[in-house]
Image (tube, rainbow, N blue to C red):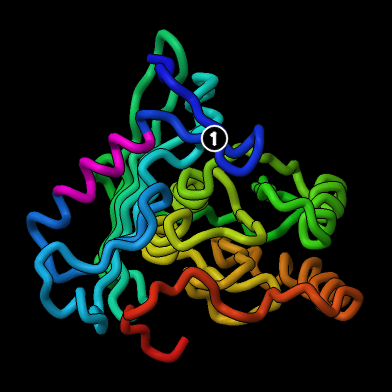
């Protein structure tokens, strides 16, 4: 069904629906009933330290749940079939469990794909093991990207990446739901996904699913990736180095040309969350 109420957040393209809010409330209630000492970071509700008044309330929790109750809200509002629900769990900043439910099909043929992964346990889609593709060249790859709401120098660079990779690959898609984009890499439908300025709730579950399906995730300047980083490249692993040869020099130039552009520091680490050195 189409949402009954749509509200704008930061602009016309950044919206929230009653479904976002109610879904997040339901997920939070479940987590708090089972793990009252854990911290929660939700896209709509922000940081919740603890429901018990225990250790997390005073800071120092090792566990953080990252919730995107409706990733791809604009798609959902238009009944466009690229959106999902994403729930991931970090232990000291490292993803250890995650699940994404992708809504597929569209009007008159809605269906779902349910992805899940545990650290060291592999990744599944609808209960069956899934793995990344065997494609080993960008020329033969289908790529995915995304564009955030802030139209700054990084956004402009990604527009140039879109044009560039359209010339050198089989194609570039922009579908508008990061968690779903990551799961499609894990399922072997696409070979890579890159974007600037993703948030922890966008990627926490998805990057674990990619890694457990045999893929690789780094920042766009080649560093080990954490959910608190500001750029990301996820791939099947086989095209990763070639993708980086296209991307890394341009990102280096971008940061040199725009001294105020900060792509190195972490963001959205909740106060009181116990993160090991990332």
**Would residue 266 be found to the left or right of residue 113 on screen?**
right
Q: Residue sitting at 9 percent across and 67 percent down? A: 52
Query: Looking at the picture, how far across and down is residue 10, in whole percent?
Result: 61, 43
Mark yes or no: residue 70 visible: yes
Residue 123 visible at all: no
Q: Residue at image x 36%, y 43%?
A: 69
Q: Position of residue 123 (x, y in %)?
A: 32, 57
What residue did someone put label 1 on? 15
Question: In which quarter of the view is residue 205 placed?
Answer: bottom left
- Quadrant of the image containing the N terminus: top left
Residue 22 highlighted magenta (yes or no): yes
Secondary structure mostly taken by the magenta-highlighted segment of the chain: helix
Tell whether position 111 is magenta. Answer: no
Query: Of all residues shown, which one is farthest toward the top?
Result: 108
- Eyeballing the image, is 277 above or below 262? below
- Disc 1 element: strand
> For the magenta stretch, what is the residue range?
20-29
Q: Is residue 269 left or right of residue 267?
A: left
- Relative image position of residue 8 (x, y in whole percent): 56, 34
């Amino acid at each position: 069904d189409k949402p009954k109420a749509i509200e704008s957040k930061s602009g016309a393209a950044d919206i929230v629906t009653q479904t976002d809010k109610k879904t997040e409330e339901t997920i939070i209630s479940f987590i708090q009933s089972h793990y009252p000492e854990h911290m929660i970071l939700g896209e709509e509700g922000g940081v919740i330290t603890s429901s018990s008044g225990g250790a997390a309330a005073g800071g120092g929790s090792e566990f953080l749940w990252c919730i995107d109750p409706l990733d791809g809200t604009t798609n959902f509002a238009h009944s466009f079939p690229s959106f999902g629900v994403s729930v991931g769990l970090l232990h000291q900043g490292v993803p250890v469990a995650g699940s994404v439910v992708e809504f597929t099909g569209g009007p008159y043929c809605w269906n779902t794909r349910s992805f899940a992964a545990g650290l060291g346990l592999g990744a599944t889609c609808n209960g069956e093991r899934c793995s990344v593709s065997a494609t080993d060249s960008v020329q033969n790859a289908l790529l995915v990207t995304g564009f955030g709401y802030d139209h700054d120098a990084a956004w402009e660079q990604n527009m140039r990446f879109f044009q560039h990779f359209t010339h050198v690959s089989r194609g570039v898609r922009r579908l508008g739901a990061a968690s779903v984009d990551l799961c499609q890499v894990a399922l072997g439908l696409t070979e890579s996904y890159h974007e600037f300025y993703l948030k922890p709730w966008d990627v926490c579950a998805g990057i674990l699913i990619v890694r457990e399906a045999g893929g690789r995730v780094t920042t766009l300047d080649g560093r080990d990736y954490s959910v608190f980083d500001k750029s990301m490249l996820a791939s099947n692993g086989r095209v990763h180095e070639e993708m980086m040869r296209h991307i890394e020099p341009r990102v280096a130039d971008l940061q040199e040309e725009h001294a105020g552009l900060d792509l190195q520091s972490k963001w959205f680490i909740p106060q009181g969350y116990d993160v090991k050195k990332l």
